[in-house]
Amino acid sequence: MSNHADVIVVRSGADHRAPHLGTLRIGDWEIPCVTGRGGLTEPSRKREGDLCTPIGVFPLRYGFYDPAVFGDAPRGLAFPFVPKPADWLWVEDTTDPLYNRFAQDGGGGGRDNEALFDLFVPVGWNDATPVIGKGSGILIHAAREDFSGSAGCVAVARSHLMPLAERLRPGMLIDIGFADTASAPARAAEPEAGGPESVTFRALQPGPRLLIAGAVHGNEPAGPAAIARAIAAFRAGALRLGRGSVTFVPVMNPLAWAQNSREGMRNLNRDLCERPVPLDNEDRLGNVICPILRAHDVLIDLHSFSAPGEAFALCGPADNDGGLEPFHRAAEEAALVRALGLPLVVHGWMAAHDRALAQRRAAGGPAGLAAHGVGTTEYMRFAGGYAVTVECGQHLDPRGPEIGWQVILNGLSHLRMIDRPLPDLPAPRELEIGEAILAADDDDRMIRQFSAGEPVRRGEVIGQRADGMPITAPADGALIFAGLTAAAGTELAFLCHFADRLARMDRSSEACAGSRPAD
């Protein structure tokens, strides 16, 4: 780009508490702006209704204005502005053949927020050949008075609209990126359907092969947002890899992501393996993902959950030679999960799942195999590595992407892959997953939505059977993976017991260190 004044540079996300706040710059002229309430997103992960602004460099072709507000002044500017009709609309309906097109509806306008669009410039996103569901109506327009986030547009103060319009030139581009992105990214290609995208950074010095994944479930946006920020930071030089390699897979299940659903055709994080004859989307993904997992030593898998609650991490079993989940890297995994900085660590999933299957069979519920409990982290342990699942909070918690970002930084720091000291972190609380609380009937239900890790007391009423009898907590502990309802013979929730396995490992390590002779 020959002239920096020919590009509008938008940068946001510097404040994780308000990721929509940013700046808009043309040459030496800089003003505050806002982007989408959901933050920024990579073009391949942009979808209709996600409240995110796409990252990339996009053309600006024309603009519209309201003559009743601005008179004819915009017609005399260098950039091509035309009066907007009173019945204008931007088509966001994914079933409409005019999707992501400017149109007229034959009505008289009268939108509640019409003043925000007294002058606006469409951003050239998904408009050459619109891909249904990949986002529509990305505009530059006036911000609300409280400077709250937009639905995905770039917005500036109303007082800055005309000064901005006066600086626009034909053929201008808009470069949208994270606040710590130093230079303009390459022009983004339109996303293609298919397998998961991966980005790898390699250092010249040997070291761990780390894999960081997101969106195993398609309705969990925190992981992709945090990973996009990390990729941008590495590309801009804000993060530098000192040893080993790190591979980012922002969206493990592109079909589920495009649908904004937990699953594409089934749960990718169950019964994960390679299949010679794949029958569905998740079978085909397994044939791609399993080799990626085997090619790495360590996995950090970023998730989120539907119920309210604090972020937490899940790790695997203690070292063992058993038949269910043999493992010999528990010390390394425990050190990693402590370093990630989550307030709560949960372990014992595979053993709890196996016990739940026995409970199901005893209750006459649907049969199942222990292998059904194998997801990305279990497969990584099976392949000889170690892994941690991180639940970044509730799906739409605005803190989720920042939690994921800090987890990425802490993981890289712990593995000595970047030059960054680990923060001083308190020891996490621990829970061991115990017994399943099964639904005996499709109409059994919990009395309310319990948050992840919420404590309960023995005998406390937590649900109601279809016949009106109460469901009570069988022991003191905490609930996890609790829904409101479940199919008969499946889990309404799991009861966890308070544990101290990681703390005991810490004490054992300290005792061993203290018994070593001095050099």
Image: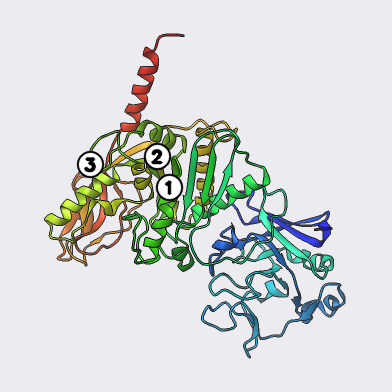
Residue 501 spot, x, y in % from top left:
31, 32
Relative to 31, 112 lies left or right? left
| Helix, strand or loop for disc 3 | loop
**363 is higher (above) or lower (below) than 503:** below
Q: Residue at x 33, y 22 (%)?
A: 508
First along the sequence among labels 3 and 1 = 1
Residue 215 spot, x, y in % from top left:
46, 56
Q: Amino acid at mark 2?
A: Gly
Residue placed under numbered mark 1 in the picture: 293
| Helix, strand or loop for disc 1 | helix
| Helix, strand or loop for disc 2 | loop
CA distance separating discs 3 and 2: 17 Å
Q: Choose between 294 and 87: the one closer to the eye.
A: 294
First along the sequence among labels 2 and 1 = 1
Residue 29 spot, x, y in % from top left:
82, 56
Q: Residue at x 42, y 39 (%)?
A: 343
Q: Amino acid at mark 3?
A: Gly
Viewer can see residue 245: yes
Quadrant in the picture for residue 362: bottom left
Relative to 366, 1 lies left or right? right
**341 is higher (above) or lower (below) than 177:** above
CA distance separating discs 3 and 1: 21 Å
For the residues labelled 3 and 2, say whether their Cβ atoms are less than 8 Å apart. Answer: no
Residue placed under numbered mark 3 in the picture: 323
The colour scheme is: rainbow
Residue placed under numbered mark 2 in the picture: 385
Q: Quadrant of the N terminus?
A: bottom right
For the residues labelled 2 and 1, say whether their Cβ atoms are less than 8 Å apart. Answer: yes
